[in-house]
Amino acid sequence: MKYSLVLQEDKTTIMHDHCFFTNFHFDPEVYYFLYVGELKSYGLNSFLQKKLSAVVKRKVECLAVVPDIHDQYYYPNIIVPASANSKQINSSGRESFRRPSSVFLKDAVTNIYINNCLDVILDHQEQLYIYMFESDPAMTFDQRENVFLLGPDKELAKNLNNKAVQFELMDSRIPMVDYRICSDLQELLFTAAELRPLWSDGIFVSRVYSAAGIGSIITRNNTEIEDFFAGDPGPFLMTRFMPHIHDPTVLAVVANEQDVFIAGIADQRIEGGNRFVGSSWPSVLSADILQQLAEATCKVGQEIGRMGYRGIFGCDFIVTDDGQPLFIEVNARKQGTTLEFCYTLEQILGKGSPNLPELEYHAVLDNAFPTNTVHPPLVSNIKLCWETYNCKLKKQCMTSGYIPQALHEQKSFQRVARGRLQKDYLVLEHVGSGFTVHPGTFLGRVVAVGKRRQDVREGLALGRQLIDLTRQK
């Protein structure tokens, strides 16, 4: 089935249903690429848009398919596919929930309206590129003729995001925490009981597919394991929990078996030992430790590069009390720091130097970085610092206020770096007013930028207070 086309003021408007929201109006003069992912990474598209415009010599725009259920949308060309579960989402939009990636992607690829939009686009351009936060086999738009994923191979990325695969791959290649891989709950309980006297500070247990602390727990006894993973078939990754202060994360791009670009190193904010809520830059770690982290990440990048991985990835570490960095995990995808690092690199690198989406473009299509690539220093002299906070709900709440989307994040970085501002903070992707917001959903995010850490912390606190005021008391 295809929807009819209605001409309005020299543009084509595609008639639709099956969508929670859309403001897409097709323009035959525009070259489109497709972004599939959450709104929190939407800003990356402007960098790819600039690159593609230079390549195709046409006006380029992004058509974004996103899962976020908000009261209003501030960007053009947005499509929010309706959920297959009609009980969870309705036209009034009074419930906001975070769909699992697999559910969202199924909703997207089976959506009649979205597929019709792609038909129309492909009638007017030779190919369509897809850009994603994380390559996922559940996204099958690229099975169409002349549709290409501009990112890491989907099956390889899925395999590399398996924590058991990661640890076995990098074992003995870089320093890492002690670990065991257990095939099922029975083996997990037996091994935990055996190691607990030796791993006296606790045992960290995670499903092999887990991110941002979901599906993981720090345990002090086997009862906690049984309660948390009851009915879970496994497999599991079990690691020795080591008390520590620093949780650095390294963002990078791999172009081939040798070339790895280190974008930067940030400090993660971890609550409760395993719950990621934000990051800050520059890292407070010493130059020597930063160098060790970069070298370990380069080894990871070269290893996954040999397997065929091309594009952006990240590595998470802990730093022990005696100053030793230990590997925790690979994120075979873009990380939560990616957009802020793009804005940071704009200020650090020379004019015209390729940024992360452009580096990924060349890594995927050329197996090499462009000749004008500039590698940033691990310790920058630029007077700029930033911090982020994700207001992700632990329990359901109602909202009784809204915060308009701040659209000037890139300009805030520019103005602070160039001395036109001392500090700034922004609230991003607030759900809106009058919603029942489900657990696990982002109520909003805060980004604070400034010349001093004190200013950044102040801005972050103000942003969090502003978000809190929108909760119904």
Image (cartoon, rainbow, N blue to C red):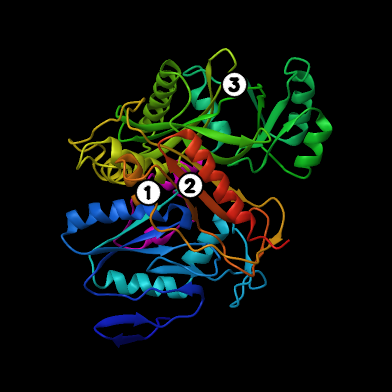
Q: Residue at x 60, y 77 (%)?
A: 92
- Whether residue 226 is situated above or below residue 195 in the rendered picture: below
Judged from this view, the residue extending furthest toward the top is 322
Q: Quick check: is 150 in the magenta stretch?
A: yes
Name the amino acid, label 1: Ser
Observer-side mark, 1 or 3, equals 1
Observer-side mark, 3 or 2, equals 2
Q: CA distance from mark 1 to mark 3?
A: 38 Å
Observer-side mark, 2 or 1, equals 1
Q: CA distance from mark 2 to mark 1?
A: 10 Å
Name the amino acid, label 3: Val
In the rendered image, which residue does mark 2 sit on? 447
Question: From the viewer's perspective, is 156 left or right of 400?
Answer: left
Crowding near the residue tagged with mark 3, few <14, some 14–19, many ≥20 C-alpha atoms within 10 Å: some
| Quadrant placement of the C terminus | bottom right
In the rendered image, which residue does mark 3 sit on? 177
Q: Residue at x 39, y 32 (%)?
A: 264
Crowding near the residue tagged with mark 1, few <14, some 14–19, many ≥20 C-alpha atoms within 10 Å: many
- Picture quadrant where residue 299 is located: top left
Name the amino acid, label 2: Val
Which residues fall within the magenta stretch? 135-159
In the foreground, 163 or 272: 272
Could you tell which of marks 1 and 3 lies nearer the N-terminus? 3
